[in-house]
Each structure stands twice: as C-alpha cells, then as structure tokens.
Amino acid sequence: MKKRVLLTALVMVMAALSVFANGAQEQSGNYSVYLITMDQMDQHWVNVNRGAEDAAAELGNVDLTWLAPDTKDDAKQIECINNAVAAGADCILLAANGPEAPVAALREAADAGVEIVYIDSAANFPGRRLLATDNRAGGRQIGERLLQEFESKGITSGMIGIIGVNAATESCNQREYGFRDAFEGTDFTLLETQYCQGDAAQAKDMAANFITQGCVAVYGANEGSTVGVGNAVMEAGAGTVIGCGSDSSDMNLSLVERGALLCIMAQNPYKMGYEGVKSAVKVLQSDMAEGATLDPYYVDTGVEVVTKDNLPE
C-alpha cells in the first residue's frame, strides 16, 4: 500500500514538473532561427550576421544561431541545413550556395515544419521571402563606371578579364551578366570567366594571368575574387590595368583607397540579416497557408558604387 502511494505521488510530481517545464517554454516564446550562409570567410557574411543579431536582440524573442561552411561547398551547406532541422529550428535564413544542390534538404526541412526565408540568393525551392541585392543591376553599374574611366583615358577597345566564384552561385552570376550587359555594342572583348571558389589567393593568380595576357581591366564578382584582383593590380603597378569588383569589405575598401581598385559594388549585408530575422518572426507569428509568401516577396536591399570619391569614413 505504501509503495502504491509513493508511486502515485512520484507520478504526480513528475507530471507537475512536466507542466512547469512546458509552461516555462511557452512563456519564453522564443523562436529558433538559424542563419545559414555560403561560408564564414567573407566579411559580407559577418555583416549579415551582425544585422541578424541586432534584430534578434531588439525583438527579444529569437534564439539566433549562425551556421556556415568554412568555405563554399554544397555538401557542407546541406549538412548545416540538416543540423539546423535536427536541432529544432523554427526558421532557416538561407543564402543558398547554388540553386539546385540544397533542394532535397530544404524539402525535408519544410516537411518537418521549418520555415524558409532567403537572403542574398535563393534556391529553387519555395520560400516565404527573398531579401537580396539586384545583382544584375549592380554589376551593370560597375561596368558603366568602368566605361566612363576608359573614356576619360581614351581607351576604346581591349580585353577584360572576369573572375567569378563558381558556375552555381547565381547571385555572382547575375553580377557578371550585368557587367557584360554594360559592354554590349562596344569594341571591348570580355574573356571567358575564371572561377576561384571565392578564394583570394586563387583569384590573384587568375588576375595576374589576365594582366599578362594584356587585359585593360579585370573584374571580380565577389569579395574574395575582388581582393585577388586588387592585389594583382598592386603587384603589376598603378596604371598597368584597371581593377574593379564587388563587396565592400575592409580590404576591398582599402584597395579602392590605394588605387588598386577603381570601384566596387557595395551591397547592404547588414540590412539582409536585420530584415531577414524580422521577416522570419513575421512568418512564424502568422498563420500562413502552404505556398503563401510575405508581401512583397522580393525585398531589394540596395546597392551603391563605391569609388575614392565616396569612400565611407
């Protein structure tokens, strides 16, 4: 009899503890949001995370985790997605390394009830919102600024080298397309794109090769490739070739200041992260039907062409 009473009491205590724990969890109301970027190398992603952290702190109901491969790698990014789902993510903020590779993992995430919001670049899988740069327009602006420089120097033709990340990174591909758009109908020859996987050292070697071929300019489509271009121009000597590219990291801004880069396409990564977290919470707090998106679906986070004349202080 005493054993039965003690057992009953133990069950009641365990039930009470369970209710207390569940109640405390409901009271906290925190959403688990995972920011998954292409890599951890580029300052661009550090600034995305900084914006996301500020939004999470401001809202006060978000547990934010940043996951990313050490370098751009589809398999490693897929592993990050799977880890986020296994850890109980409510929403994934994803900058997709490529449009196709993560689709199966994202489908499994969605089947598990995880919401998807894209920043910087989307995969070919439905998400609730995309916050990104108009990369094609930004690339075209860099090309147009380069044409102005050519005109001022009396250069009317020549070869131009292009260094991208990889063939699957659509955001960088769009920048390249826009850059090429600017030269349609001119006498300049844009060479076949070389891919460096975002590695500045590889990009420097590729840029040096373009310079050896006699290119009048070299363009880098992301932070690492642009650093490589600037460093190669520095070694070649001022006036030998014109460098230009993308992403306003401290290194790239320094290269603009020193004259190794004519200009860079500056995105707003902080806004991507900040508005990305706010969009995630908006999705999680609403009762959205399957396939529905936030209005507007696409949010242009802006772009600016930075030269020596408008360097940030």
Image (cartoon, helix red, strand yellow):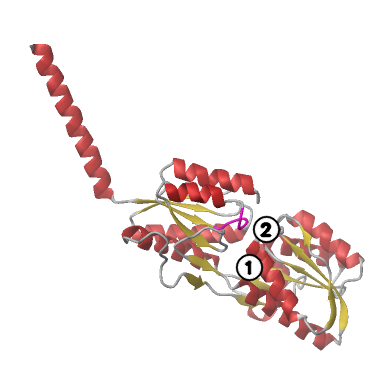
Residue type, mark 2 in image? Ala
Instruction: Assess whether residue 99 is covered by the magenta stretch.
Output: yes
What residue range appears in magenta? Answer: 95-100
Whole-number angstrom distance, CA of label 2 to CA of label 1: 22 Å
* Vertical comparison of 306 with 59: above or below: below
In this view of the protein, can residue 86 be seen by the observer?
yes
The residue tagged 1 is 248
Q: Tell me the SS state at disc 2.
A: loop
The residue lying toward the viewer, choosing from 264 and 112, is 112
Circle 1: residue type: Ser
Taking 130 as reference, is 251 left or right? right
Q: Position of residue 98 (x, y in %)?
A: 63, 56
Is residue 70 rendered magenta in the image?
A: no
Q: Tell which tag, 2 or 1, sits nearer the viewer.
A: 2
* Mark before the other along the chain sequence, 2 or 1: 2
Residue lying farthest to the right in this orientation = 213
Task: Give how far across and how far down residue 269 sits, in percent.
Answer: 55, 65
- Please tell me whether residue 239 is drawn above or below residue 85 in the rendered image: below
User: Going 78% across and 65% down the picture, which residue do you hit?
Assistant: 229
Out of 4 and 265, give the one closest to the viewer: 4
Q: Find disc 2 in the rendering and name its residue.
A: 168
Would you identify the image quadrant in which residue 75 lies? top right
User: Which residue is at a point 44% across and 57% down the rendered structure image?
Assistant: 53
Q: Is residue 249 visible?
A: no
